[in-house]
Amino acid sequence: MALKNINPTTTKAWQELTTHYEEAKDFTINELFNVDSERKSKLSITDEDLHLDFSKNIISEETLKLLLNLANEVELKDAIQKYFSGAIINVTEERAVLHTALRSNSEEPILVDGKDIKPKIQTSLRKIRAFSNKVISGKWKGYTGKSITDIVNIGIGGSDLGPDMIVEGLQYYKNKLNTHFVSNVDGDHVSEVLKKINPETTLFVIVSKTFTTQETISNANTIKDWFLRSASIFDVAKHFVAVSTNLEAVHNFGIDKNNVFPMWNWVGGRFSLWSSVGLSISLAVGFNNFKDLLDGAEKIDKHFQNADFSENIPVILALISIWYNNFFNAETEAILPYTQYLSKLPAYLQQAIMESNGKSIDRNGDKVNYQTGTIVWGSTGTNMQHAFMQLVHQGTKLIPADFIGFHSALHGLEDHHKKLMANFNAQMEALAFGKTKEEVHLELKTAGLSEKINQLLPYKVFEGNKPSNAITFDKLTPGSLGKLIAIYEHKIFTQGILWNIFSYDQFGVELGKELAKKMLKEM
Ligand code: G6Q
């Protein structure tokens, strides 16, 4: 059941890609379009409300064929089957990786240590639903008999970034509860949140798989002390709930055992928003929306498992990214959502992608001799067009970009949305096709700047040939957001398989933590 252990550079496809690159590096996206009038439709995939247009990449049909061969040679299909069925693919931590089970509606059992985990997942979903309904409806009362108005999620990393990003992303669907997030051990973070809330009407959700994380426990203790200034220890049960695997530590903190929501070792922190870690999401937007988020992700799970690789959105995105990372030596990728709602998506994906694939030891225990995890960064359009996009358009680096857009706006304001989407398309067009010397020449001449042409011309030329993917949905809904996140989760998985690394541990974050503890003692 173990994952295959294949150094990708030893495959036939990799060698062929290396040879092919010598020719492909001189391809231009412009020329690729000129020679094939159907390129756009050929290099597009539609799946219900989701559309991927990957035609504006420096790839030919031959490139694609070789990349798909690479996926087959490293036996990606076999790896996907192991991923979904609960094989111990997180080998270094001896765990299965089953965030996909959290959103599966199928009754097919999935065994972990010989036991079906599906019933536990269903029980936990029922608990999230019942609890969310009670709090949202106002039936859950605080220690002075008042209903809850504010939720504070206390967690960090995987226990913070996902819920925070989704709550922000689904703001349009939010109910009247105010949701706050405290993560940083910097006391100013928690202090600013405490300024905004009333202990009588606030519910604290402590999210920590281990319940030992320094930041989370420090923040939780500070909040509990603050709470006990106006309430008594017997009131804690009405205001504190926990999401954790460490029942003993939760109990010692003073949380009622009925107020503990489960987490499991087979769900990694950065993939846990689909579990009880998403409790704040369910509280903020209601359980039905939370469930729609899960159902959207499940649709992509099925697509990823069943679609032919040539039509498989996560696989195609992963392969294209490998093409630039390993052959063009691109170092970074930009993630550019054209919706203000997804302003936290880049930070969320930075953890998911960089913590997962920022590895340099292969599945054989050897140091890799090729590049692995990409650096990802980004921001929302159109704001970033007035900021860092200069470097993407005219800098010296190749930065493949994912543009994420939605055909309709949530609040209407059609005029705004048309402008937004015109910019969305214009950026990709400008990146891909640029502006030639001839065009600049004519433009300057028409503007009556003939005598400045020689001086200005080189600065105004856009070389173009900057690759992008357009990922579009009809509308930003819980379901489409679930799909979007699942696409990136499976892209991460696919790249980890191709790079022959273990994507689901994170030993790289340990050393700093250990040293900080040591230094704290010394202080
Ligand atoms: C994610 C990481 C990490 C983790 C946090 C919080 O995959 O493991 O970001 O989520 O360190 O951990 P706890 O939930 O245990 O507090």
Image: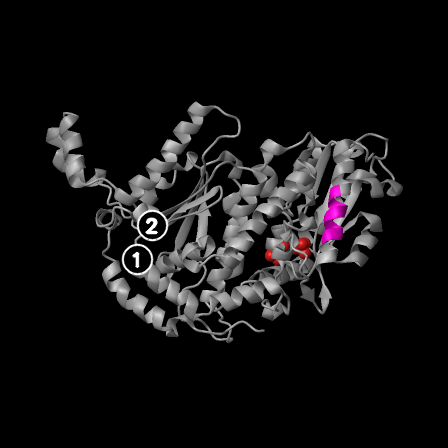
Q: Residue at x 89, y 42 (%)?
A: 234
Q: Quadrant of residue 187?
A: top right
Asked if 58 appears above or below 225 in the picture, the reply is: below
Characterize the magenta stretch by its predominant secondary structure.
helix
Compared with residue 255, is residue 85 higher up or lower down, i.e. above or below?
Answer: below
Question: For numbered disc 1, what is the local secondary structure?
Answer: helix
The Cα atoms of the two marked residues, 2 and 1, are separated by 9 Å
Tell me whether the residue at label 2 lies in contact with that at label 1, contact meaning CB atoms closer than 8 angstroms.
yes
Is 125 covered by the magenta stretch? Answer: yes
- Tell me what residue is drawn at x 64 percent, y 70 percent: 94
- The answer, for residue 430, to whether it is visible in the render is yes
Q: Residue 42, which numbered label?
A: 2
Please provide the residue range marked out in magenta: 122-129
Front-most of residues 231 and 496? 496
Badge 1 density bin: few <14, some 14–19, many ≥20, Cα 10 Å: few
Specify whether residue 315 is painted magenta. Answer: no
Residue with the mark numbered 1? 61
Q: On the image, which quarter does residue 7 sit in?
A: bottom left
Residue 126 image offset from top left, x and y in percent: 75, 47
Kind of residue sitting beneath label 2? Lys
| Quarter of the figure that contains the N terminus | bottom right
Residue 328 is left or right of residue 479, and the answer is left
Tag 2, which secondary structure? helix
Could you say where residue 435 lies in the image, as x and y percent from the top left? 22, 39
Relative horizontal placement of residue 430, taking residue 403 as reference (left or right)? left
Q: Tag 1: residue type?
A: Glu
**Camera-side residue: 138 or 398?**
138
Mark 2 or 1: the one toward you:
2
In percent of width and height, residue 297 lies at 57, 49
Residue at point 78% right, 50% down? 260
> Is 98 drawn above or below residue 384 in the view shown?
below
Q: Is residue 323 above or below residue 132?
A: below
